[in-house]
Amino acid sequence: MVHFNFNLQREVKKNADGVEGVKVSYPKFKNGEATVRNARITQNFDYVEEIFQTYLMASKDEISDAANKLREMTPAPMNSMLEKQPKEDAIKKRDKRRSIVVTDVPPTTPVPQPSTSMTTNSSRPNKRTHPNEASSSSRPRKKPRTSASSPTPRTEKGPRTSRPGKRAQGSKPSTSRRQGKKSRTSKS
């Protein structure tokens, strides 16, 4: 605080020609645009010596009187200035608020209800079928492929691979026989 007060109104630095000096900076948030400020004289730290000399010249009585004056000037903490609610009242208020039962909470935004004309089949266009074709409901359904050449299905472990024995790039390798088990060599 003392440093701020002593160095707040520093004079502008001037060149030998009497021209005021400037300081140019390029902050990142301005994306290359410059900020120009006046160059100020160097900071003054003489206040430190002044405080030290005052301390050396003062007697113990003067120091204690100054400390008492500072204590009197210091305001009380903000939380002690407020009028506090009694603890019992605060607990009753919380219990009362928790005992309230919420029965129905209406939505904050209206939910669009589907109209009856959308749900009926009459609004859908009819499929045109050839007279020789059977209806779509009498056609046999396709069976899922189960051959070994089909790509492996997606699992929680990672993405589908292009070939059954290979793993996709970026997926974790599975524990193989070489990693998990010791080789079975018999000594005879």
Image: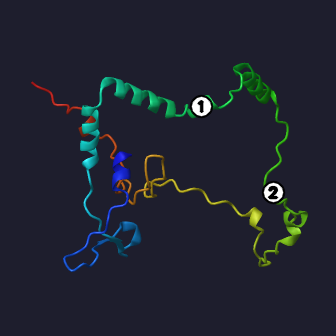
Which quarter of the image is occupied by the C terminus?
top left
Q: Looking at the picture, does residue 26 appear above or below residue 75?
A: below
Left or right, 63 with reference to 133: left
Looking at numbered disc 2 in the image, what kind of residue is underneath it? Val
Q: Earlier in the sequence, mark 1 or mark 2?
A: 1
Where residue 182 appears, x then y in whole percent?
21, 32
| Residue 37 sits in quarter | bottom left
Where residue 71 appears, x then y in whole percent?
47, 29
Instruction: Tell me the CA gap for discs 1 and 2.
Output: 47 Å
- From the image, tell me which residue sits under label 1: 79
In the foreground, 162 or 28:
28
Question: What kind of element bears circle 2?
Answer: loop
Give the label on residue 111, or none: 2
Where residue 177 appears, x then y in whole percent?
27, 38
Give the label on residue 161, or none: none
Q: Residues within 10 Å of mark 1 (few under 14, many from 20)?
A: few
Question: What kind of element bears circle 1?
Answer: helix
Residue lying farthest to the left in this orientation? 188
**Residue sitting at 50 percent across and 30 percent down?**
72
| Residue 98 sits in quarter | top right
**Residue sitting at 80 percent across and 50 percent down?**
107
